[in-house]
């Protein structure tokens, strides 16, 4: 499995997210994702910045929380 | 093992001394100190968490796990003390805001409890083993002592038999009328009318004889007492003679009683050491008393056959036999106590085992410690160490990616791109306390036909001032057009507003139209130049539900906005920068979703205010 932009990831809780964008910082991968609706016809109003963690050939996505983190990550996603 | 950067720690100590030594440049020095200690703390905490991840490598045995947990506990305590000292220094300098690692992420209560349980179990296990070994030794001792006791009893039985035989066979000599005469124990009893071989085996007969002789002794004793009193009161030859006769009878009775008591003792066979010994001592005393009785009766014994019995010899030989009864009792008592204590410890260990073997608790606790990913902790330091964060092997976590695939054709990527494009920038601005310069004005003298916003994917211009084409911007679609009324707009500020709006509306979809436009800033007023009769105010309002705008009688403007307003990133629809600033609070950092949801609620409030302002404007007009 490889996380790529414009692909849909399915999480363990069965939520599906579309990968909208990706940046890397300090060796970590951050993804801008939007939740996909059940019919997979559109995205929901649920956007997240997540950090990918690789462990034992598994990928885990954890939402980036906290003002400081967001301040440092969000600008990287803003494309002029 | 807690990994502390000693160089950094030394530096911190130096900085601490500096802070305590001088107050000059205090702020700068304190900041430097805080940076240093935060680095030390951060590195140490990271090393501790890293160590926690490896618990699985250390739980092959309880001893290993105990050692590991004690190491964790030690590291935790060490870091806790360090943090305390760091905070003390900062508080000494009046700074109470030193942010250090959150040690509460480590479930130290579980660690301590587990250490106690494992310790208790292992100590009990060792003690149980020691007790078992001791019990085994004691049991072996007991077996040996029991054998000794059996041997002793056998020996005592043999001695009893030997004593009886020696009585039956004992011979002697007595002096009668100056001549030595043969005598024996059997003969002496025969003269008393007792067949010793019969009486020794007939205990009932012996008892009866003893009762009779006791009775006789009492009677004779009373007689003797009376005679003695008489003689003492009336001492004369007759009284003396009577007294002497009664005395002889009395001694005779005593002699016979003594002989029967010897027989009684001989009839008992003791295997008990003490009783055995006591029996012989009593026999020897009785034999001695018998002699005194015989002397009193005028019988002189040259060679006493009773002295040839083995009573004395056996009594002397008892010293070579050891009575181990006390040893056996002591061993048995110790075995009993040890058994009780061991059972207690075994029961206690059963409870420990329940705790240790409580699969759920143990597994959860172990995994919750082992599977904490340091990188995640760094990302979200305020998250509790939670069992939901654990990665049980074979268990899929909520945040685990289980599939990555290409979207189906049903997903319109262009729409998705429109929806998502401006969100990040908006949120970024929010997070950085970016405030839009939005003001709400009430224009009293304006006619305000309102823009009706209904859930629709497009904003349709009903006003003649707009073209009917559709403009897409960012994540909503809006009717695009140039305002033909541009040239007829009221002079002054209003015109600028309209122009700004027009400018924004005409921005293409790639230019973040909402980033620069000022939604809801002011009602847009313009005159409908085409018929020359209307002066209109257009108020753009957006809310989640379908909004039916109020249109004045003179107003003809009606617009429809994207029906997917619910799907829009509501962050766009913030109208008051102050409110946004409030939401981006340093103390309370909200998640992406939370921030947007709060903005959504603010948007509804804004709508209400706008409607009210509009009404009042029209009323005033």
Image (cartoon, helix red, strand yellow):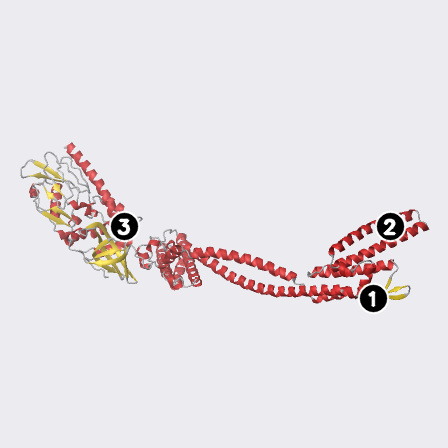
Mark 3 or mark 1, which is nearer the start of the sequence? 1
Q: Residue furthest right?
A: B237
Q: Quadrant of the N terminus of chain B?
A: bottom left
Callout 2 touching callout 3 (CB < 8 Å): no
Q: Label 1 crowding class (10 Å Cα cut-off): few <14, some 14-19, many 20+?
A: some
Which of the two residues, A68 or B205, is positioned nearer the viewer here? B205
Q: Up-down: is B499 above or below B21?
A: above
Q: Which mark is residue B224?
A: 2
Q: CA distance from mark 2 to mark 3?
A: 121 Å
Q: Nearer the viewer, mark 1 or mark 2?
A: 1
Location of residue B284 in the rendering, given as x and y in whole percent from the top left corner: 78, 61
The residues tagged by marks 1 and 3 sit, at their Cα atoms, a distance apart of 121 Å
User: Regarding mark 3 in the picture, which secondary structure is present there?
Assistant: loop
Which residue is tagged 3?
B591
Q: Are marks 1 and 3 in contact (CB under 8 Å)?
A: no
Disc 1 designates what residue?
B172
Residue B170 visible? The answer is yes
Asked if residue B330 lies left or right of residue B170, the reply is: left
Subunit under mark 1:
B
Against B163, residue B386 (above or below) is above
Disc 3 packing (10 Å; few <14; some 14–19; many ≥20): some
Does label 2 lie on the same chain as label 1?
yes
Q: Quadrant of residue B573?
A: top left
Could you tell me if the residues under marks 1 and 2 are in contact, i.e. CB atoms within 8 Å? Answer: no
Q: Chain of mark 3?
A: B
């Amino acid at each position: 499995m490889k996380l790529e932009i414009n692909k849909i990831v399915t999480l363990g809780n069965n939520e599906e997210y579309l990968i909208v964008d990706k940046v890397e910082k300090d060796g970590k991968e951050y993804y801008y994702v939007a939740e996909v609706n059940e019919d997979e016809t559109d995205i929901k109003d649920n956007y997240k910045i997540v950090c990918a963690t690789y462990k034992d050939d598994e990928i885990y996505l954890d939402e980036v929380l906290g003002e400081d983190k967001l301040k440092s990550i969000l600008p990287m996603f803003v494309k002029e | 093992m807690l990994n502390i950067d000693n160089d950094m720690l030394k530096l911190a100590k130096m900085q601490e001394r500096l802070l305590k030594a001088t107050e000059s440049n205090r702020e700068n020095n304190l900041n430097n100190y805080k940076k240093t200690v935060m680095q030390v703390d951060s590195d140490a905490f990271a090393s501790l968490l890293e160590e926690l991840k490896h618990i699985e490598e250390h739980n092959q045995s309880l001893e290993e796990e105990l050692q590991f947990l004690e190491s964790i506990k030690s590291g935790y305590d060490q870091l806790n003390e360090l943090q305390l000292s760091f905070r003390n220094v900062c508080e000494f300098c009046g700074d109470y805001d030193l942010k250090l690692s959150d040690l509460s992420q480590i479930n130290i209560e579980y660690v301590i409890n587990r250490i106690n349980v494992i310790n208790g179990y292992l100590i009990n296990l060792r003690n149980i083993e020691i007790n078992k070994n001791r019990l085994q030794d004691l049991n072996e001792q007991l077996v040996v002592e029991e054998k000794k006791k059996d041997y002793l009893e056998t020996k005592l039985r043999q001695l009893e038999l030997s004593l009886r035989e020696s009585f039956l066979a004992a011979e002697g000599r007595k002096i009668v009328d100056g001549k030595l005469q043969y005598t024996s124990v059997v003969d002496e009893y025969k003269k008393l009318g007792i067949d010793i071989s019969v009486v020794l085996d007939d205990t009932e007969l012996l008892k009866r004889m003893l009762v009779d002789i006791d009775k006789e002794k009492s009677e004779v004793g009373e007689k003797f007492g009376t005679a003695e009193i008489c003689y003492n009161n009336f001492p004369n030859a007759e009284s003396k003679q009577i007294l002497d006769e009664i005395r002889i009878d009395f001694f005779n009775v005593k002699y016979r009683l003594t002989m029967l008591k010897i027989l009684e003792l001989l009839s008992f066979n003791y295997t008990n050491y003490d009783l055995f010994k006591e029996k012989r001592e009593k026999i020897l005393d009785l034999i001695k008393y018998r002699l005194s009785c015989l002397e009193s009766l005028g019988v002189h014994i040259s060679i006493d056959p009773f002295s040839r019995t083995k009573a004395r010899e056996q009594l002397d030989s008892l010293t070579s036999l050891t009575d181990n009864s006390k040893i056996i009792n002591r061993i048995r008592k110790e075995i009993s106590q040890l058994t009780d204590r061991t059972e207690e410890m075994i029961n206690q260990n059963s409870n420990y085992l329940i705790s240790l073997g409580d699969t759920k608790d143990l597994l959860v606790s172990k995994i919750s410690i082992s599977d904490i990913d340091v990188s995640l902790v760094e990302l979200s330091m305020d998250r509790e160490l939670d069992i939901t964060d654990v990665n049980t092997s074979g268990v899929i976590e909520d945040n685990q990616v289980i599939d990555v695939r290409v979207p189906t054709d049903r997903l319109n990527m262009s729409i998705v791109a429109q929806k998502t494009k401006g969100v990040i920038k908006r949120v970024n601005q929010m997070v950085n306390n970016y405030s839009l310069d939005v003001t709400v004005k009430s224009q009293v003298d304006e006619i305000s036909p309102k823009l009706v916003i209904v859930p629709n994917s497009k904003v349709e211009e009903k006003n003649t001032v707009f073209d009917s084409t559709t403009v897409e911007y960012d994540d909503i679609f809006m009717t695009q057009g140039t305002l033909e009324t541009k040239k007829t707009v009221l002079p002054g500020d209003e015109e600028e507003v309209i122009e700004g709006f027009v400018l924004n509306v005409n921005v293409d979809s790639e230019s973040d139209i909402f980033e620069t436009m000022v939604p809801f800033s002011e009602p847009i007023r313009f005159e409908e130049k085409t018929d020359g009769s209307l002066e209109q105010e257009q108020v753009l309002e957006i809310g989640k539900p379908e909004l039916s705008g109020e249109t004045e009688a003179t107003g003809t403007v009606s617009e429809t906005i994207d029906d997917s307003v619910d799907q829009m990133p509501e962050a766009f629809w913030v109208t008051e920068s102050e409110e946004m600033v409030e939401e981006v609070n340093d103390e309370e950092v909200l998640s992406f979703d939370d921030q947007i949801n709060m903005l959504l609620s603010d948007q509804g409030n804004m709508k209400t205010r706008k409607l009210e302002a509009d009404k009042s404007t029209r009323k005033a007009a």
